[in-house]
């Protein structure tokens, strides 16, 4: 028996996470459950019925929240229900690509800001999809999570405004290593040198002030105009939700953030040469993160705060 299909009338009035047939429910759930502290299944999916992920569990309403929690109120709701089958009729009605075969319905109370002033380059694809009145509060936080899931799972976020947001999965280049061990600038150079040839610790590093932090820099080529990679070492002030229950975080956490200093079109290139350069930088950052984790332990998270396995 096939799962029930989503009706176009329902789809038009909800934000949707749209995915291909090869994405399993467990993949969606693992991302959401790790990203939003306290979220849980209230109904597991079956071959006949979709499941329901509650992002605002009732047992937490009115409680104090930590990193990764969404703000709660007795009247608020935030659920992700799916997977629903997307048939040809619905794909046509919503102008969806042929590869979309399943939908997850976002149920959250709309919360919009006042008119936002126009910016020359906009506010980014997600906020720009709503015109001058941007999503706010719980709605904004839920959409951030769903948009991140769409990028990780090579899917689409369809907003209630009818805009299809299809983030490029390969645009997530940056990584952060969260670990219990502090490396001195000298040790950082020894760890990264073999995988990032020519990496240098920047002036201003303070080897004796451990949690004051320091930086290292690496340029992918000899071209001065090509964006480099910045490695930032500092003490973590906020613990990411996926690490909330990790035993090793009890004595404090150090973050080693590897950021590619590229913006805009360079992160989502269209030419083959630019695509190759981005892929090369991405591979270099992955090698560097793996080298760091081999020495300091901990976990690696991507730009959206999801755990990454570099094995």
Image (cartoon, rainbow, N blue to C red):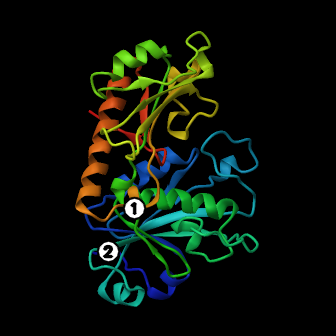
Please give left or right for residue 197 compared with residue 218 in the image. Answer: left
Q: According to the image, label 1 marks what residue?
A: 45
Residue 84 in view (yes/no)? yes
What residue is drawn where x is 64% and y is 69%?
A: 119
Is disc 1 placed on a helix, strand or loop?
Answer: loop
Give the mark nearest the N terminus, 1 or 2: 1
Q: Position of residue 275 (x, y in %)?
A: 27, 56
Is disc 2 placed on a helix, strand or loop?
Answer: loop
Residue 44 in view (yes/no)? no
Please give left or right for residue 128 compared with residue 308 in the image. Answer: right
Q: Residues within 10 Å of mark 1 (few under 14, many from 20)?
A: some
Q: According to the image, label 2 marks what residue?
A: 100
- Structural distance between the alpha carbons of marks 1 and 2: 19 Å
Q: Nearer the viewer, residue 294 or 249?
A: 294
What residue is drawn where x is 38% and y is 55%?
A: 171
Please give left or right for residue 95 compared with residue 80 in the image. Answer: left
Q: Please state which of the two labelled residues, at mark 1 or mark 2, is closer to the viewer.
A: 2
What residue is drawn where x is 31% and y is 74%?
A: 101
Position of the C terminus, as image quadrant, is: top left
Picture quadrant where residue 1 is located: bottom left
Q: Position of residue 25 (x, y in %)?
A: 36, 58
């Amino acid at each position: 028996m096939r799962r029930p299909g989503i009706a176009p009338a329902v789809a038009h009035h909800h934000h949707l996470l749209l995915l291909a047939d090869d994405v399993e429910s467990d993949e969606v759930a693992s991302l959401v459950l790790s990203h939003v502290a306290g979220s849980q299944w209230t109904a597991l999916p079956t071959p006949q019925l979709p499941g329901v992920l509650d992002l605002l569990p009732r047992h937490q309403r009115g409680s104090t929240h930590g990193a990764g929690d969404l703000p709660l109120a007795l009247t608020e709701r935030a659920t992700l229900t799916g997977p629903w089958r997307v048939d040809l009729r619905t794909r046509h009605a919503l102008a969806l690509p042929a590869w979309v075969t399943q939908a997850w319905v976002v149920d959250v109370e709309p919360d919009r800001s006042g008119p936002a002033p126009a910016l020359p380059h906009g506010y980014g694809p997600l906020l720009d999809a709503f015109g001058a009145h941007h999503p706010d509060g719980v709605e904004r936080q839920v959409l951030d999570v769903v948009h991140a899931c769409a990028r990780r799972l090579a899917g689409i976020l369809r907003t209630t405004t009818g805009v299809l947001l299809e983030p490029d999965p390969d645009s997530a280049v940056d990584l952060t290593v969260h670990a219990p061990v502090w490396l001195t600038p000298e040790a950082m150079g020894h760890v990264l040198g073999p995988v990032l040839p020519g990496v240098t610790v920047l002036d201003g590093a303070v080897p004796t002030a451990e949690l004051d932090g320091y930086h290292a820099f690496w340029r992918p080529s000899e071209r001065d105009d090509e964006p480099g990679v910045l490695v930032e070492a500092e003490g973590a002030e906020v613990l990411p939700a996926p690490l909330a229950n990790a035993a090793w975080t009890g004595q404090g956490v150090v973050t080693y953030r590897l950021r590619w200093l590229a913006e805009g079109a360079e992160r989502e290139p269209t030419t083959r040469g630019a695509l190759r350069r981005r892929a090369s930088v991405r591979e270099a950052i992955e090698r560097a993160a793996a080298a760091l984790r081999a020495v300091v332990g901990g976990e690696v998270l991507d730009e959206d705060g999801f755990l990454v396995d570099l094995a």
